[in-house]
Image (cartoon, grey):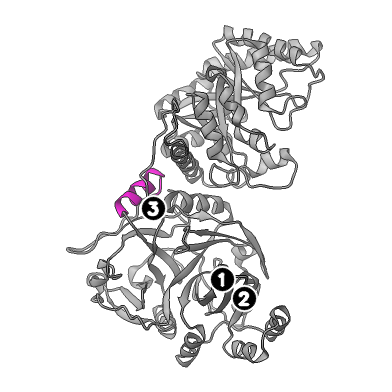
Amino acid sequence: MRTSIATVCLSGTLEEKMHAAAAAGFDGIEVFEQDLVVSPSSPERIRDLAAELGLGLDLYQPFRDAEGVGPELVPAVLRRAAAKFRLMNRLGTDTVLVCSNVATATVDDDAVAARQLRALGDLAGEHGVRLAYEALAWGRYVDDFEHAQRIVELADHPSVGTCLDSFHILSRGWDPAPIERIPAEKIFFVQLADAPLLSMDVLSWSRHHRVFPGEGDFDMVGFMTRLVRSGYDGPVSLEIFNDAFRQADVRRTAVDGLRSLRWLEDQTLRALAGQPVRDRLELQALPAVAEPAGYDFVEIRTARLGETTRLLHQLGFALGGHHQSKEHVQVWVQGPVRVVVVDAVREAVPGASPTEIAALGFTVEDPEAAVDRATRLRARPVERTQGPGEQVLRGVHAPDGTEIFFCRASPDGVPPWLGEFGADDVLDPAALVTGVDHVNMAQPWQHYDEAVLFYTSVLALEAQPAQDVPGPSGLVRSQVMRSADGAVRMPLNVAPAAAEQGSFVGAAYPEHVALACSDVVAAARRARRRGLAPLPVPQNYYEDLVARFDLDEAFVASLQELDLLYDRDTGGEFLHFYTGTLGTVFFEVVERRGGYAGFGAPNAPVRLAAQYRRSHEPGARQRSPRGAASPQ
């Protein structure tokens, strides 16, 4: 599939956008008029640069207010068009996007619109240019792609075709099925954009909230299957208007965009499997991978080794050993849970937080295929050295910089790499901690959508509906990524802006590891005996608990004694407690009773408020923000 991206999607100068698109792996670009107008480079220089970078100049856009005008405006339209066509000849691009009129149209007559497009087509033909007519969702008289196609048919000109834009079609709820009936040779260009479902005017929605395919709520795969059935064989391009994208690093946004197209290409091919379709787009599949079967390990990097290992001891973990060739690395174990601890002081990691989640290992069926898929999706491989005889762990960087490793399952549940710590026989069936329930990862607001797509496309996790949780620093947006069987749950939280600006005493917004437990009361008592001071829960919470659930007061008193929190749904009950925060990490210990499926969301505001208070106590330790992720 030929991939393209509109320069309006990216931050920076036109030249910077072109370099980023080429480096990401795009085949071509759409040149947005404003990017060229403000560039000091001549059209000829941009044409030459594109050739140097191996980029096609697939489209010039937009040409506005072209059809449906009164006769007095037609000469001005043709004059403007002639100037643009000459410019396109210098630039070396042969297709221009013509938007349905939103400003100067005064004649609601398809025959008039078609006649005016035909006149433009005559002029375009003289310059070797094609017109791709697009129905804007807010067009004055033409806002429907089928209506635009009828006008194209009436124009009946070889230089006049249609442009299909998924946002303009799906945002209005139009059925994309009629795309299949459009003659392929009359589809001159295709633009893709996804978006979250929002209740707002479509113009504002379009200008500020588009996202890459797979990062929103539109049925992009359904749109693409219709396109394939039409027989279209041209570029598939991204046109994204998004405030965050235009402020983000141009290189990582370009990579995110290419990843979205490769993922969509793969998903479309799988949706069409077994159907008698002539695929003129030549879709390519990614290596097939199954969703992860669970967490293999969690790695914590810390400059406060003593406090971190003390906390693990309080939670019931035992030291499994030190790594045979990396003395600054140790592993702590409890039941099937393995926490690798890296001494950041001895490792000398620049810019690292005093304590942070540095890596996650996932148990997968085929690690080689998983890594192959991830790298084809433009994830940056992790460079990690192994000594003689040591296991090769392969992984990639997530958008926030976390290292994601793909680990092969072991028949006895003990991973081979554990032997490098001298801890090859540490499973304890009587351990209170029975697994990793979930890992909650904090994401920078400007890269949140990128993270959702990453975990969807690379790890085959499914995004659950997002929700907002109120806290002292503002609303926290949370969206759970999970495997179908729930073996892997990963809530992604977007920190409120106030948190990023230091409301946690200079800390990046905290994230945590939730440990599944068979008896949270026993785990809490053991932790207290070992000196743990859990995150305090106020009396008001327990009084409210009685009112909400009509619980036995003796039961509530036992919860209060141990600072345990409680929730209940139709499936069962949820009991949990939190530790304090070290750097940007804290732990949660949870017990699910029955079929409880949530994460204790009603209790999150209690936790957020308690963390806020503790971080503002006199003498609270200053904490460095998590190191910025490198572009992928």
Report which residue position mark 1 lands on.
596
Cα distance, mark 2 to mark 1?
9 Å
Looking at the rendered structure, the kind of residue marked 1 is Tyr
Q: Is residue 537 left or right of residue 455?
A: right
Cα distance, mark 1 to mark 3?
25 Å
- Observer-side mark, 2 or 1, equals 1
Looking at the rendered structure, the kind of residue marked 3 is Ala
Q: In this view, does 9 lie to the left or right of 304?
A: right
CB-based contact (under 8 Å), mark 2 and mark 1: yes
Report which residue position mark 3 lands on.
290
Report which residue position mark 2 lands on.
567
Residue 122: x and y in percent read 63, 7
Residue 6: x and y in percent read 55, 33
In the image, residue 311 above or below residue 226? below
Residue shown at 56%/26% (left/top)?
Answer: 180
Q: Tell me where the magenta segment starts and ends, as one range.
A: 367-379
- Observer-side mark, 1 or 3, equals 1
